[in-house]
Structures are given as structure tokens and as C-alpha cells.
Amino acid sequence: MGNRGMEDLIPLVNSLQDALSSVGQSCSLQLPQIAVVGGQSAGKSSVLESFVGRDFLPRGSGIVTRRPLILQLLSANTEYGEFLHCKEKKFTDFEEICKEIEAETCRVTGSNKGISPLPISLRIYSPHVLNLTLIDLPGITKVPIGDQPADIEYQIRDMIMQYICNENCLVLAVTPANTDLANSDALKLAKDVDPQGYIGVVNRSQKDIDGRKDIKAALLAERKFFLSHPAYKHMAERMGTPYLQRILNQQLTNHIRDTLPTFRSHLQSQLLALKKEAEEYKNYSPDDPARRTKTLLQLVQRLAVDFEKLIEGSGDKVDTVNLSGGARINRIFHERFPYELVKIESNEGNLRREINYAIRNIHGVRTGLFTPDMAFEAIVKKQILRLKEPCMKFIDMVSQELVTTVYQCINKLSSFPTLRNETEKIISTEIREQESKCREQVMLIIDIQLAYINTKHEDFIGFTNNISIMKGGAKEYWFILTAESLSWFKDDEEKEKKYMLPLDNLKLRDVEKGFMSNKCVFAIFNTELRNVYKDYRCLELACNSQEELDSWKASLLRAGVYPEKVDEKGNGAPENLTDPQLERQVEIIRSLVDSYMNIIYRTIRDLIPKTIMHLMINSVKEFISSELLAQLYALGECSALMDESPEQQQHREEVLRKHTALKEALDVIGEFSTSTCSTPMPPPVDSSWIQSSRYKHTCTVRLQ
């Protein structure tokens, strides 16, 4: 059987399996085990009961095994069983074990034939068993009954494959002797992953079971059958339940030996991953005031660092899937807010209509000769007032992103629910306070813009200075364009004024370059065919570059001087506007409003994000960094703040338990000798009828 150290490895693996199952990590190590596979009523239960020498498994029609049963057999001086789900209780009555399996099955699957992949773990100690770990899987079925789903056959096959595809799993395929091996579902599944041999056993018949024939008597009858049967007596020593049990024991032991290096490597990897956390928990005293204070300080400091990283974009870990809080706020600054400002701009028709009514209402019954300043100011103030809504919406969007970012950081405090809740309250209150201050400041900024309309601003259309050349004597003059006139002076000192040309009825036309000239030229003319300057019907102006020409055209267009080919009906004038002088005044004010509002938009787009950054984002960041801890201490319940959640307590216990189990397993494995002898495999089954793709040790039971 090999050395004793290797024999002790099976109980060790069983203990490790229990320890890891309690923390939900048993599958990650792929522990060596034997899966028992077969169709309904194939005899799986009889084989397992023969191994134990006791009747302990539920019986009946249909699918009796509806949850995987992890059966751990351990050689001992006394005989009893214990379940992992009620480990404190020892079962000496094997009928009670049967009832507990039924009850635990129904607890999860119900009483109407439902199935579940959640295993039941049963450990049996007995002087009559060899060390083995077997998993009794639900019998293969094709027709659903009771609460079973329509795809029950595929669900059971998937469940079986999850176990037998494990590299460290041996397959015990059970099939009746009166069934053609080529038609055995169990053997077919086994051969999908492993094409190896079989051993014959003789189980109790249904009549024997109904007559409560003793298993010991059944084993004696089995032995007598193989010794006396002419077809089997020459190989009787390699047949029967005891031989199968020894083969399974040896093959499982050999398999553990073969996989020991890889298994040890998995254990070491998991132990290394747990080492830091386990060391932290090992000397952890939940009720130690000093420990609680230190942990509180560390958690608040980490919260501040995490929040700053998410806002500022710093840190060693960069999220490549989602935008961080800072990146989302940046997008609001430069995409969402400008878009909201653009949405509030009135269309040309509405703007002209508002200007028209403003001018007419200001003039009243009188006919105005000049464009009223009050109309321009009234329209500008109305446009500025419309900025309040997008600015408030802007604050809401940033505030929501701040809250989301804070929650993302606070969720790391879930191990201490009281601390998490109080921290959330304190920071949320601070965000609301800073948001209120920010709203007041933004409203103040808009009120300041309303308080004084600065028509002397250097970017305002009425005070744009340009140098040009007038083609009428080919002299250079200094030109000034306002909303109502085009004036030119001798030079930029503006001491000697040459002429002032009203913009009424003026149009713009392009002029082709001369053959020898490198100047860009355009012309201004009067639509009523009047002279525009002295005896000139049109005034040709030359610029040094196309850029200067485009700039002049844009400025003239804002002042109401349109290109010659522009259809006057397409300029968006309000309906029933037939007064040429009023139309001219509307165009002048519209150009002035556009020019002034462009200045306002640029100011708002620049100043509001800065205000929010200062009053909200930076203030909250500074509060978390320097004030949060003091606010928590001010609650006067620092000890209560650090009460752990039940989940954290359980996690700490699981980490320590798993760490201990892994360390113990590595210590024991280190003492083993791997020079055990191996037992030859049973004779192979003819596998020419099926293709197989994987190779592992399998024992197939053929029942006589």
C-alpha cells in the first residue's frame, strides 16, 4: 500500500477540503477526489454502502440523489458519521444519517424532486473502511418529473462534467452487468475524459434489500460467487468490492502523489496571497481602544487619498474601463456646460422680434431718429438672465459627480457600518453647504454682469480698430467701425478726422485683384445709388491679406452691412416689419447684442467652472483631508464607530482559518515521501467504439 505518510495524505486532503469549503474556496485548488457516476438505479448507492458496510443512503424511485454528496471515509477505531453543516453532532445511528441526508436535500431543493449543485459533506469514521473521498452525483435521467426543469438531463450532465473534468478527479463509472457497455451513459461520460479499465462487483438485489439482507453477508456471497463462477474464478482476486475499494484507495493515493508538486504550488500561492491579511488579523484585538483609534485614523487618511486620486487623476492604478470622478467633472466643464449655454441662445427670428418690440415700445408714440440705447440694454439683460438656469444645472451636475465619487470612496468602509454611515452624513452635509455657497456666488456673478453693461469693452463691436487703405487717391487712413458709422482719420492718433460714413443702406461687394496688385479688395456702395464719399459711387478698401479681408467682412456683417448677393428676405426679419429705418435699428442692435453676449459667454464659460472648482471641489477635498477626522471625534462615540460588521468578523475568521489550514497542509506535505509504490491499473475496457480526448485514472464498476 506504500508508506504510511502517503496514506495519511487522504485524511489531510479531506480536512483541507472542509476548511476551504467553509470559506467558499474549495474548487479553486481542485482537490483530488473520486466522482461516482451512473444512471438511475445503476447501483451507485449499493457500491458506496458496500464500502462503508452500512445502509445509510436514501432509496426510492426516480432521482434519489438530488444534491452531490461528498463522502469522506476515514479509518478509525470507532464508527460514527458527522456532517459539515452540523459538525458538532456525531451520528452513531446510520438510519439517522439517512434521514439527515434526506432533510438536508429537501431544505435546499424542496420535496418535489428538484435538484441543486450545492453539495452535502458527510464524513464517516469506521474501522471497516479505507481512506477514500468520493462524490456521489445525481443519477443520469432523461425525463423530468415533479419540480424538475424540462432540461433536467442537460443540467445533471453539466453538474457531472464540472466534477469529472477536474484534472485531479478520478471517475468511478457504475453500470449494471446486464447493460451493454456501448450503451452505458455513465461509461460514455467517463470515456469523454478518460478511457481506462473496469472491476466487477456483485451487489445485493432489490429482493435482498427489501429483505434487509446484511451487507456483510452480501460481501461473503460476492466472494463465493467469484471463486466458484467458471468465468471469473481465475481472476477472483481482482474482482469484488474489497478489491475495488483497495484499488480506489491506491489510485487516489497515487494520484495525490503525482499531483503533489502542482498541488503544493497552488497551496503556496494561496498562502502567499493571504499572508499579509492574515498577519494583520492574527494579533487583531477588536475591543482594543488603541487599535480602534489607529484603524480609524488609517481609514480616514486612506479615504482622503482615494478621493484626491479620483478627482486629480493621480495614482498608480489607472482605471481603463470607466471614467473617474475628476474626468467626468472635466467633461462637464468643457462639453456639457458649453452645450447648455448654446441651447439657451435665441434663434435669429425671435431675437429680431424681441428687439423690434423693445425699440417700438421705447419710442412710444414718437418716431425715433436714432437707435435707442435702452433697447440694447433691455435685450442684453434679458439674455444674461437666461444664463441662470444652465449655471444652476451646471452646479447640480458637478454636485452629483462629487457625491458619486465620495460614495465610491466611502464604500471601502463597509467593514465598519457605523463609521461608514456617519462619514457619509458628514461629507454629504459639507457638499450641500458648499453647493449652497457656490449657488450664491454664481448668482452674484450673474447679478454683477447685469449691474453694468460695459459698452467700452475692447472686444465690443463698436470699438474695433483696423488699419486699411482707401482706393481713392491710394492713401492710407485709420478706420473705425461702429454700429452706426464708418469713420476714418489721418492716422491712429485720431486727431484729424477725414470723414464719417453712415451705414444706412450700405452693402458690400467683392472686387477682383488687379493684375499687378497683391492687395485684397472689397467695396462698399449705397443701395439707393447715392454717392458714398465725395463723388464716388462706391468706396474700395484694400487689405494686406485675406485674413484681414475676412475680418473686415465679419465686422461689417455684425454692423448690418451685408454682402450684395444676400437675399434680404432670408435675414430672419420679423413679420410685418416694413419700416426701413426700424429695420436698420433692429439690425444694429442685433449686431451689438451678438457682440456683447459673446463677451458674456466667454466670461461665464471661464469664470463659473473656476468658481465651482474653488468653492465646491477644492473645499470638499480640503474638508475630507483636514476636517473629517475632527468631525468624527466630535461625535464622542469613537469606540462605537469602529464596531465591525458581522460580515467583516466572519471574513477575518475565515481568512485566519484558511491561512491555518493552508499552512498546516504545507507542513504535512513537506514531511511526506513521494517514493510510494504504485498498483497496476485494472485491465482496460475496449474503447474502440468511442473517441476520447483526455486521460486520467478511472475505475469502472460493472455489476453482476
Image: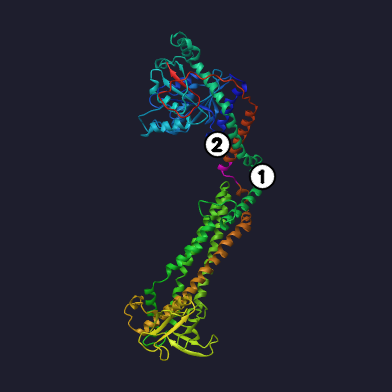
User: What segment carries the magenta color?
Assistant: 643-649
Left or right, residue 169 beside residue 666: left
Q: Which mark is residue 288?
A: 1
Residue 355 position within the rendered picture, expressed as x and y whole percent measured from the top left:
39, 78
Q: Nearer the viewer, residue 628 or 203?
A: 203
Residue at the image position 52 percent from the left and 88 percent from the top: 490
The image's colour scheme reads rainbow
Is residue 27 covered in magenta?
Answer: no
Q: Which residue is mark 2?
A: 23
Residue type at tag 2: Val
In the displayed image of the protein, which residue is found farthest to the left?
Answer: 576
**Res. 380 visible in picture:** no
Is residue 647 covered in magenta?
Answer: yes
Give the spatial CA distance, label 1 vs label 2.
Answer: 27 Å
Residue type at tag 1: Asp
Q: The N terminus is located in which quarter?
A: top right
Q: Nearer the viewer, residue 519 or 463?
A: 519
Q: Residues within 10 Å of mark 1 (few under 14, many from 20)?
A: few
Q: Nearer the viewer, residue 469 or 221?
A: 469
Q: Which mark is residue 365?
A: none
Residue 454 position within the rendered picture, expressed as x and y whole percent measured from the top left:
51, 79
Q: Residues within 10 Å of mark 2 (few under 14, many from 20)?
A: some
Circle 2 SS class: loop
Q: Closer to the N terminus: mark 1 or mark 2?
A: 2
Circle 1 SS class: loop
**Res. 641 visible in picture:** yes
Residue 19 position within the rendered picture, expressed as x and y whole percent measured from the top left:
57, 32
Q: Nearer the viewer, residue 142 or 466?
A: 466
